[in-house]
Each structure stands twice: as structure tokens, then as C-alpha cells.
Image: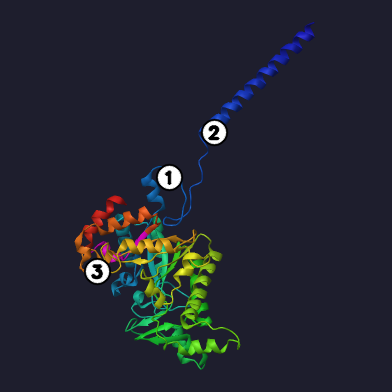
Amino acid sequence: MKKSFVRLLILILVLSLLTGAVMLYARHQQNTSDNPLPQEKSSVPVGQSQSPVPQSPDQSVAVQEMRGVWIPYMSLQLSEQERNELSFRKKIQSMLDTCVSNRINTIIVQVRPFGDAIYPSSYFPWSHIISGTQGKGVDFDPLSIILEEAHSRQLAVHGWINPFRISTGQTPPVLCEDNPYIKWQKDRNTHNDSNTFSYDGGIYYNPASAEVRKLIIDGVKELAQNYELDGIQIDDYFYPSDQENFDHESYQQYLQTLSQNAAPLNLSQWRKTNINMLVSGIYSSIHHINPRMVFGISPQCNFDNNEKLSADITSWSRFEGYADYLCPQLYVSLQHPVFPFRELADKWKDTVTNQNTRLYFGLGLYKAGTDADSGSWLNASDNLRQEVEYLRKLGIGGFMLYAFDQLSADTSQQELQNLMPIL
């Protein structure tokens, strides 16, 4: 009898403990459901594509919208007194503080303006804008400093390169002995003389040359491997003209490689193909090295001009493998007499049909407060604000302002003051 009573007490105790455990577990599951564990913060740099859950319309715009500014080589040109690490760092700090105060989240820095580099490169000589003389280096790495200071301010950095331009007029004033153009001209190999051509006082790399395309792609790989860039961008300089004379020899060589029954590409198709081979090579190289680094192209806004420059915007807009984003340079006013802003923006939006290619627009800050575009910028002081608001209505991913120096220009201040409230 006593043993049976003890067994009953033990059974009741065990059942009570199990019931309590089940209740505690259920309460824990409810708490976990109501208060999920914090997710890891996104490491996608500011200015790149993200898909956060917006908490409010303002937050959605702030997180997703590209707000860039181009920093051209002219803004980086150093005086003799600035050619040391401390002075350069102070210069960059001041420039980036200006960007932050104007609510910029991405800088597009011209790192290769004339077949040269503002960083130590194995392929291209030092730029004259850094040391005053092409080929002469400095004892610090300007691009590393730019990246360090920009990322500390939560600014994304896209490296802007001009792939084909070697010189225009007297810029740079002297090409150094290590410049690939000079090497090819002075060696005994006459075949590589066609790697470049001259046009209207300028010297350009020839896009038809496989050696040239490899050189440019190797330079991009070097940037992607050595620097924590958030993106790389090429601008609107492709073939300098639609004239036929400057690369006639290269086109004839192409025709001679065809079989008798082959249908040749015409000159325009052939030039576009050369550019497309470079563009797709850059795209694939970047994504192979760093899938998170984006590649963008900033073509002209004028469709006819792009055709003359052999910029195949149709392929870049429709098909995979060319660009992560396009940023047409829509440097026109709302009332431009020939190319009104809204009509061009609509046309570009209809053109970019690849859902994986983001569309931004370049806005002409440099025209603000001036009589540009037949004086139409003077009709109002909120042109940029209206343009940004229109782009948002179209669902465009953001904008880039040209250019940095105009952030401090007197002519731009009223436009910027009217723009700031919607950023």
C-alpha cells in the first residue's frame, strides 16, 4: 500500500514537470515569433542595388536612391604644394565633406583620364594630374586615400575610366616613355602601330585591336583586384566620330579575314562589335573578381550621337552581360528647345528593358544658374528638383550630378538649396 502511494506521488510529480516544460517552451516560441532575432546588417555599399523592406516612403528613397556626383580629373589636379600625402588627404577630406553636406551617397572619381592612372599601375603610367608630369609618381597612393576617406563617411566609390583617350590637344602636354603609345611607336614592330590612331588633334586607342582590348581589360582587373571599389564606370568616349578615314586600314584588315561567301559587317556594325567585345569583357572580368562590384556605362543622352560614336545602347539596354547600370548624361533643362528633359527621360526608360540593368540619369548641375540651353535654365531656380521628382515618378533608380566643383559654385547655390529638401 505504502509503495503504491509513493509510486503515485512520483507519477504526479513527473507529469507536473512535463506540463511546466511544455508551457515554457510554448511561451518561448511565442516570444521568438513576436521578437525575431536581429538580422545581420547588409554590407551592400551605399548607392548599389538593395531591396530593403521600406518603413516609410522617405526611408525607401534614402536607402535605394543613387545620389552621385562625378569628380573629374580637373578637380583632382594637384599643385606643387599639394603633392604630398598630408596635403592630398586634407584636400580629399574637404571635398568629401562637401559631398556629404549636399547629401551625396556616391562619388564617381576619374581614376584613368588619359591612358594613365592616379594610382600605381602595372599597365598605365602615373597621371600628370598627380605629379605634374606623366610617368612621374608620388610616394603615396591617392586612390587608397580616396577610398579610405570616402568609406569612412559611408560614401560609395565608383572608379571612372576613359578607356580609349590618350591625349587631346595639349593634354597631357607630354607623353612619357612608359606610355604604351610611345612604346609601340618606338619599337621595331610595325604591326602594333595600328593599336592607336589620331583624329582631330587627339590620339586614341584603337578598339579594333585585340591587344588594346586586353590592355584595357587588364587595367580594369587590376583595379578590381587591388581596390575595394563599389563600382567601375566608363564614360561616353568610344569612337571619336562616324567618319571613315581614321581606322580605314583596320576595317580593311577585318574584311580580308572573311571567307569569300561571308557577309561582312558594315563599318558601323563592325565598330559597335569592337566596343561590345570590350564592354562585355570588362563586365565579365569585374564580376569574376568581385560579384558585388557593379559596372556602369554613362553614354550621351542623344540617341543620334551615340550612334555616331558606335555606342550600342540598344544591346546594353536589352541584354545581359554588358552593364549593371546605365547613366545617360541628361544634361538638359525641362524646357530645352530641342531635347526637353521629360521626353528624353521617357524614351530612355522605354529603351532600357533588361530588368537587371538599373537606370540612372546624369543631371547638368554645371548649367544651373547659367544661360545654357537657350536660356531655359534661367526660367526657374528649381529645375533640378523638378527633374529629380519626375525621375522618381518614373521609378528611376537615382541620379548623378555633373560635376563636383559646381557644388560650391555661386551659380548653383539656388538650385541646390531648392533640391536639398527632397533629398
Which amino acid, by three-letter code, is at mark 2?
Ser
**Bounds of the magenta segment:** 399-409
Distance between the alpha carbons at the discs numbered 1 and 3: 38 Å
Q: Which mark is residue 33?
A: 2
Q: Residue at x 49, y 79 (%)?
A: 269
Which SS class for mark 2? helix
Mark 1 surroundings within 10 Å by alpha-carbon count, few (fewer than 14), some (14 through 19), many (20 or more): few
Q: Earlier in the sequence, mark 3 or mark 2?
A: 2
Q: Is residue 374 left or right of residue 94?
A: left
Do tag 1 and tag 3 residues touch (Cβ < 8 Å)? no
The residue at which mark 3 appears reads as 373
Furthest-top residue in this view: 1
Q: Secondary structure at mark 1?
A: loop
Q: Residues within 10 Å of mark 2 (few under 14, many from 20)?
A: few
Q: Is residue 60 above or below residue 344?
A: above
- Residue labelled with disc 1: 54
